Amino acid sequence: MRVLILGGDGYLGWPTAMHLSQKGHEVAVVDNYFRRRACVEMNCLPLLPVPDLPQRAELWRALTGYSIRVAVGDVCDYPFLLQIFKDFAPEGVVHYAEQPSAPYSMLNRETAAFTLTNNLLSTLNLIHAVAETDSACHIVKLGTMGVYGTPNIDIEEGYLEVRHKGRKHTFLYPKTPGSLYHLTKSQDGDMLYFYCRMWDIRITDLNQGPVYGLAINGSLPDDRLAPIFNYDDIFGTVLNRFVAQAAAGYPLTIYGRGGQKRGYLNIKDTLACVELALRNPPEPGHYRVFNQFVETFSVRNLAEKVREAGRELGLEVQIKQIPNPRREEEEHYYNPSHSGLLSLGLEPHYLTIGVLLEMISMVQKYRDNLRPAYFLPRVRWQHNNCRAVSLN
Amino acid sequence: MRVLILGGDGYLGWPTAMHLSQKGHEVAVVDNYFRRRACVEMNCLPLLPVPDLPQRAELWRALTGYSIRVAVGDVCDYPFLLQIFKDFAPEGVVHYAEQPSAPYSMLNRETAAFTLTNNLLSTLNLIHAVAETDSACHIVKLGTMGVYGTPNIDIEEGYLEVRHKGRKHTFLYPKTPGSLYHLTKSQDGDMLYFYCRMWDIRITDLNQGPVYGLAINGSLPDDRLAPIFNYDDIFGTVLNRFVAQAAAGYPLTIYGRGGQKRGYLNIKDTLACVELALRNPPEPGHYRVFNQFVETFSVRNLAEKVREAGRELGLEVQIKQIPNPRREEEEHYYNPSHSGLLSLGLEPHYLTIGVLLEMISMVQKYRDNLRPAYFLPRVRWQHNNCRAVSLN
């Protein structure tokens, strides 16, 4: 299958490209290097230096024989995107080309405006490019479980049948996102659902939980092929940050009471889920939603697991509560359904102590690069109430 | 009260400015003249020529003694907007500064991208300007009943309590909009609700039905003060178009079966509702939603009423079904609640034959300006399937 990956330079985009290419798909990646620029501007460099896309694609080809086509440019630039669709004629598109950080979206008006316009215009352009070139092309958009918030009822997979005053109707499951970033992922889903109804395109929306891990299936032939790994307050996901804190001998910092529950998954399962979605496209006119995670944990649970793994490595891991920079429920009901991808054949990787040992060891290998200044939250959810984001 | 009106040049913005100024409020209007440019570009000039904002404000002052401050510029330009907030220090803001046409939003990728970015960025900027200058300032945003679509259950006012598997939760009422324009009005509502929860700002979202009419309360002192009145397929609302068709001796064109039901209101009631909302702001942190309409009609009902009124004026009014350019239900359940504004004291104007006679007569006065070429739909909801929008 010809698969186009938008945002192919990112934490998930590049591993997806390698994974699909070694599974025999014809792969092209597009990226505007936003994340690289933002990591410099926000002072939160990734753990390992990452060669640029042409370099990584060349290294991948030299080591494995699989080729990945590369185009550097902006999905918000419609003529650029349209030309790629005309040249490559993808049968499936994986859309990662959105600004993915909640704190970044809450920093100030400029980062909010960028998040809003980038995430929605990239999605609009993608929809129009598909409709203009081949409306059978399947769009797989990476969403987030964070769009649902923490409602007091079960979170269903995409849709909710409501009975009201003796009648019933099935709605898209209502969203209550907790950051502007998460809001844009609800808004882009609403937009995909809308055009699906109007133009009979085919969409899969993968509402993914926080991802952890560094490896792809099989061992990486070269660490220069590892994904961009952030462990900071802006672009790092919580478990990756905890692992880095443990490796650095720094306390694991829990926001508030730590009862925040979320559904987590290993990056290996992200790759498997995306491939399962691509191999099993929905019918035209169907907006299909999967809740993409494997296990739910509270933040406190996660910290305790990392402490346990650290102990096996002889690390004294402390856990420290700090004031919550976000505005969110810290203890809440959480019971999201996630049967769709399992029924397509997903074989989950669970968060064992072994997995954590492997992660901590990989990070320890690069511990000289770890900068503890990156660990603490700089952005608060209140208006204009963030700590200065230093350039040094 | 100091009231800032964003989009103060439009069909509703300018009458709102006159209405509030004669009720003793201190009024400033902002507009970027988008509608004027679009009417030229899309070949759909309004019925009456409309003097520009400084001219209308000067005429209004000369004839009534009430003053309206004017700033021409773009709400999407944040420094411009922020300066106005600093200079004028509004206590309430009425947000009309969005691209308001469903067909315009469905014309092509460029008009879709403009609608999306303009409508969301203007709202984001407004939120940030309020938070940055005075978070007690009350935002009254004009929404649309069209965000709800036509669900098979009653449409409640803003929120819906859902019982599910033995538990319950109150959600923002789920939206199923029928055009990209309507989608953006759902997305901006979600954004206002989000920042309300995060920053404790105060919002009223007025989900308004299609508006009809030309006059403001009392008679207009000069027709040059009348609102921009569109009767075309792009910017004209359906009843205004029917009235123009009747006045021109042209058949009333119904899209499809004509069973589409909506909630309608007289422009006089729009003005009253906006003022009621301003005079009764919600508490900080509250996102209040009113469904703003007076009566529901099917399109067929409306056409029959116009035919009946035409008969009284000796006009032979025909009704003609044409293929529906939109993708929508043509017969459906529709029972939206709308008690909030009535409980604040709204005294509705109903759509009587007398009201229609007055409207038809006013349009007949300018019948030499009527261009029947404007009546027929040029934009279809399918991708790239619109008739050419001629410049001549």
Image (cartoon, coloured by chain):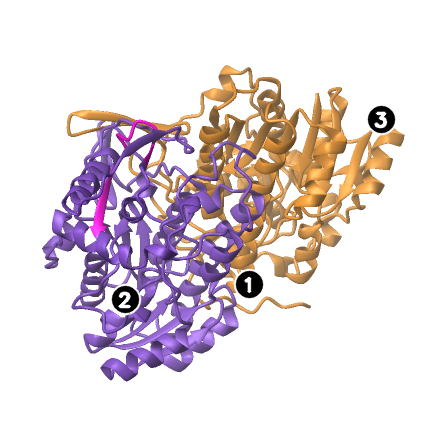
Chain colours: A orange, B purple
Check the image and name the residue furthest to the front: B314
Q: Where does residue B130 sit, x and y in percent of width and height?
A: 38, 69
Assign the magenta stretch its main secondary structure: strand
Along the viewing direction, whichever of A260 and A133 lies nearer the viewer: A133
Question: Does residue B141 appear left or right of residue B71 in this picture?
Answer: left
Residue under label 1:
A110
Q: Which quadrant: the N terminus of chain A?
A: top right
Residue B262: say if magenta. yes
Q: Residues within 10 Å of mark 2 (few under 14, many from 20)?
A: many
Instruction: Say above or below: A2 vs B77.
Output: above
What chain is tagged by disc 3?
A: A
Q: Residues within 10 Å of mark 1 (few under 14, many from 20)?
A: some
Is residue B41 at all visible to an observer of this figure?
yes
Residue at x-position 41% and y-position 48%: B101
Residue under label 3:
A64
Task: Please give the range of residues in magenta.
Answer: B253-265
Residue at x-position 40% and y-position 63%: B127
**Mark 3: which secondary structure?**
helix
Instruction: Say above or below: B55 vs B175.
Output: below
| Residue B16 disc label | 2
Along the viewing direction, whichever of B92 and B114 lies nearer the viewer: B114
Whether the residues at callouts 1 and 3 have beta carbons within 8 Å, the answer is no
Question: Does residue A370 appear left or right of residue B27 in this picture?
Answer: right
Is residue B286 at all visible to an observer of this figure?
no
Q: Is label 1 or label 3 in front?
A: 1
Along the viewing direction, whichever of B68 and B183 lies nearer the viewer: B68
Number of callouts in the render?
3
Q: Is label 3 or label 2 in front?
A: 2
**Mark 2: which secondary structure?**
helix
Whether the residues at callouts 3 and 2 have beta carbons within 8 Å, the answer is no
